[in-house]
Amino acid sequence: MSVHPSLKLRGSGKKRSVLSRVERLKLLLSAKMWSPERPVFGLPKTDPIKIKLRGK
């Protein structure tokens, strides 16, 4: 199975336009917008994560 092109990290500090379901669940759990009792289908939309690079 190949990786979708939007999930590949090509540049530094680039925003991804697609989050995996696990990443969305982590975001929603931290914002208290989802609980484990609810189904994982039909999740609310989330903003993409900005990837930060460490300084040298």
Image (spheres, grey):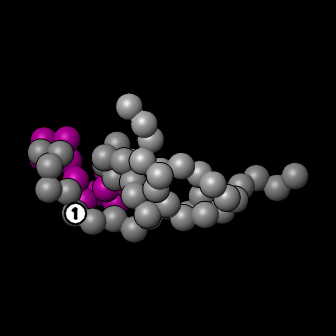
Instruction: Report which quarter residue 30 is drawn in.
Output: bottom left
Residue at image x 44%, y 41%?
3
Q: Residues within 10 Å of mark 1 (few under 14, many from 20)?
A: few
Horizontal arrangement in the rendering, residue 46 relative to residue 13 (left or right): left
* SS for callout 1: loop
| Main secondary structure along the magenta-highlighted residues | loop
Residue at image x 31%, y 46%?
21
Relative to the observer, which residue lies in front, 11 or 49?
A: 11
Q: Give the magenta-colored segment's residue range.
A: 27-38
Q: Which residue is mark 1?
A: 44
Residue 20 percent across, percent down from the top left: 36, 47
Residue 34 percent across, percent down from the top left: 22, 53
Residue 35 seen: yes
Instruction: Report which quarter residue 53 is drawn in.
Output: bottom right
- Count of labels shown? 1
Residue 20 colored magenta? no
Horizontal arrangement in the rendering, residue 36 relative to residue 6 (left or right): left
Residue at image x 14%, y 56%?
42
Residue at image x 49%, y 60%?
16
Horizontal arrangement in the rendering, residue 2 relative to residue 40 (left or right): right
Mark 1 belongs to which amino acid?
Pro
Residue 28 percent across, percent down from the top left: 31, 56
Residue 4 percent across, percent down from the top left: 42, 47
Q: Residue furthest top?
A: 1
Residue 28 colored magenta? yes
Residue 52 seen: no
Horizontal arrangement in the rendering, residue 3 relative to residue 50 (left or right): left
Please state, as top left, top right, bottom left or bottom right, where the N terminus lies in the image: top left
Q: Give above or below for 40 relative to 1.
A: below
